Amino acid sequence: MNFQIKILLASFGVALVLGLIVLPILRKLKVSQQERAEGPKSHLAKKGTPTMGGITSIISIVILSIGVMIVFYLTDQKELIKRIVPLLFATVGFGMVGFIDDFKKMVLKNTDGLKPTYKMIGLLIISVCFVLYLLNVLDFGTETYIPIIKTFVEIPIWIYIPFAIIVMLATTNAVNLTDGIDGLATSVTTIIVACLTVIGVIFDTKEIIVFGSIVCGCNLAFLLFNLHPAKMFMGDTGSLMLGGVIAGMALVLKMPLLLIIIALIPVIETLSVMIQVTYYKKTGKRIFKMTPIHHHFELSGWSENKIVTIFSLITLILCVIGLNVI
């Protein structure tokens, strides 16, 4: 346990220092948030706030992961290195897709950013590589834990592969939609990652314990810059990266179905968009004032801090429930 605490504190320190270094650089380069005219009017005041801050978390995670892998190599725990590699790959891979999108928008001033088709292809390639690595390199098997009945079920490989890929794509996009107000995605995902890390402790899955501790430390440091009023936004760089982290950890734990419970907030955020679009196409009317649903509450008079607090508390309760159904 002392090792995990040291890792968490080290990652917090590295991410904090990097944040302090990167923030003025982003300001100098004018890599700033461009708010949508159709978005909440209160968000127009955020225009000019540096974004792409997720790069600090990615760099910190890479530094700490490499450091941990060196320790494992020197202590003859090479098998753990092989198990951390896919988690790091998914984290960096998804983050880089987001980075390219942010870079085109913020630096090259291409308002369209990365074309949705290209973005999805990038995410798909990373997801396929991750799943195939688990199956072919780690010989992971297709057992999947079914919450509540508390048992593993062997899924036919021709079903498991597309299922696992969909889990990664859906989780990544769900977290991306959750990132809409100061500190929301960071707070919610930190709680989810912490829950998955605790599950790693329960099942003694060392790569999850170590990697989860690293991500939690980095997220906590980023929160110092991201809480309302945010000094820095994570951008797609951070939100896609965090989606990859959560999906990757859940698949390594063989518990992707648990995300329906512990990641219910991102699920609801996604469903709110789907329901709104479908209903509007059929009737020309809206169910919510604006989607994703956190904007609905914002336009209903809730402050950003209130939304973040309530959504985080709900996630915490759901994670406690999740821990009780495994």
Image (cartoon, rainbow, N blue to C red):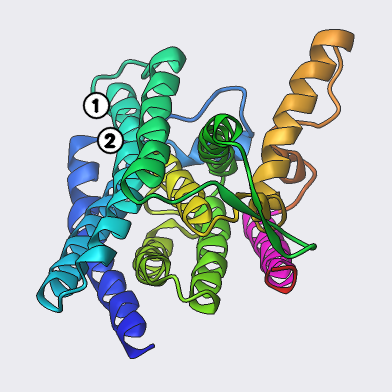
Q: Which quadrant: the N terminus?
A: bottom left
The image shows residue 296 at horizontal and vertical percentages of 75, 39
Question: What stretch of residues is rendered in magenta?
Answer: 303-322
| Mark 2 in CB contact with mark 1 (< 8 angstroms) | yes
> So how many labels did they put on this image?
2
Kind of residue at disc 1: Val
The residue shown at (26%, 57%) is 82
Residue 171 is covered by the magenta coloring: no
Nearest the camera: 193 or 149? 149
Q: Measured along the vertical axis of the image, is residue 70 above or below residue 31? A: below
Mark 2, secondary structure of its residue: loop
**Disc sitting over residue 31 in the figure:** 2
**Disc sitting over residue 89 in the figure:** none
Task: Estimate the spatial distance between the alpha carbons at disc 2 and disc 1, rounded to whole Å.
Answer: 6 Å
Is residue 51 visible in the rendered structure shown here? no
Kind of residue at disc 2: Val
Q: Measured along the vertical axis of the image, is residue 59 above or below residue 69? A: above
Q: Which residue is mark 1?
A: 107
Is residue 254 visible in the rendered structure shown here? yes
In the rendered view, does 23 fall on the left or right side of 300? left
In the rendered view, does 167 fall on the left or right side of 245? right
The image shows residue 23 at horizontal and vertical percentages of 25, 52
